[in-house]
Amino acid sequence: MRLILMGPPGAGKGTQARVIAAELGIPAISTGDLFRAHVAKQTPLGIEAERFMSLGEYVPDSVTNAMVRDRLDEGDARGGFLLDGYPRTLAQVEELDVLMTARGIALDAVILLIVDGDEIVERLLRRGATEGRTDDNERVIRRRLDVYAEETEPLLLNYSRRGLLTEVFGAGPPTEVTSRTFAALQRSGLMVPNPSRGQPRSGFEGAQPSSRSTT
Ligand code: ADP
């Protein structure tokens, strides 16, 4: 399966990406994690990326696209993948389309985690205090949210027009968010129910196919 996980900074993409990808037996590919690994090793790419990340700006498309292209050509991504944090700009959407078409593969779904703005800032400030991510301070968080609204939200319309977008309510315990995501993938016919996995509570209105995806 080939999936994209989208949502604002702090929506819980990283946590969900790891669990969902493990269940589906595909790699979770996080551009944020790839960049942080380069920064930690101080590779030329890491040194370049760090300048943008520390300000809450996006790393230039040319750098990001080349990194993702290489990662998708690694053996473990041949049978499927879950992208976390990519694409984030329209140019990245185009690049991913070109890259996938050239390889004769297509996207199955784009999952959008929906979380309220105040909750996001709280979560990120908490993460900054506990995990020490240098971009989790209030000024940079605000910039990251603005950049998301300007650069990345427009992508949602693009994917919903293609019938790929599925919205999942991202508040509450991570395990519930995971159950809602699996329920959404089942509704789209991409996954079969697995009784051992646990299902969303009955009557819970968490995972709804996007109303936008029907237009
Ligand atoms: P967040 O969810 O807060 O955006 P990530 O770990 O996904 O955190 O990303 C951290 C930073 O890495 C971003 O603020 C940005 O600078 C850079 N980055 C990650 N993915 C991309 C991308 N697809 N395009 C450009 N920059 C990116």
Image: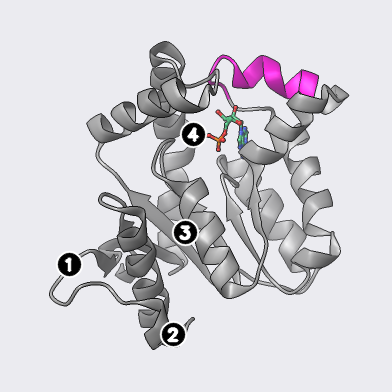
The x and y percentages for residue 35 are 70, 33
Q: In this picture, is 160 found above or below 59?
A: below
Real-space CA distance between mark 3 and mark 4, rounded to the nearest whole angstrom:
14 Å
Q: Are marks 3 and 4 in contact (CB under 8 Å)?
A: no
* Left or right position of 186 against 20: left
Please name the residue that numbered disc 1 is placed on.
Answer: 205
Quarter of the picture containing the N terminus is: bottom right
Please name the residue that numbered disc 4 is placed on.
Answer: 151
Of residue 149 and residue 29, the one placed in the foreground of this image is: 29
Q: Secondary structure at mark 1?
A: loop
Q: Is residue 91 at all visible to an observer of this figure? A: yes
Real-space CA distance between mark 3 and mark 1, rounded to the nearest whole angstrom:
23 Å
What residue do we see at 68% from left, 70% from top?
80
Marks 4 and 2, the one that precedes in the sequence:
4
Within the image, what quadrant is residue 118 found in?
top left
Classify mark 3: residues with Cα within 10 Å, few (<14), some (14-19) or many (20+): some
* Left or right position of 31 against 162: right
Three-letter amino acid code at the position of disc 2: Gly
Of residue 13 and residue 72, the one placed in the foreground of this image is: 13
The residue segment tinted magenta is 46-57
Q: In this picture, is 94 found above or below 79?
A: above
Please name the residue that numbered disc 2 is placed on.
Answer: 189
Decide whether the magenta segment is chiefly helix, strand or loop. Answer: helix
The x and y percentages for residue 185 are 42, 75
Real-space CA distance between mark 1 and mark 4, rounded to the nearest whole angstrom:
29 Å
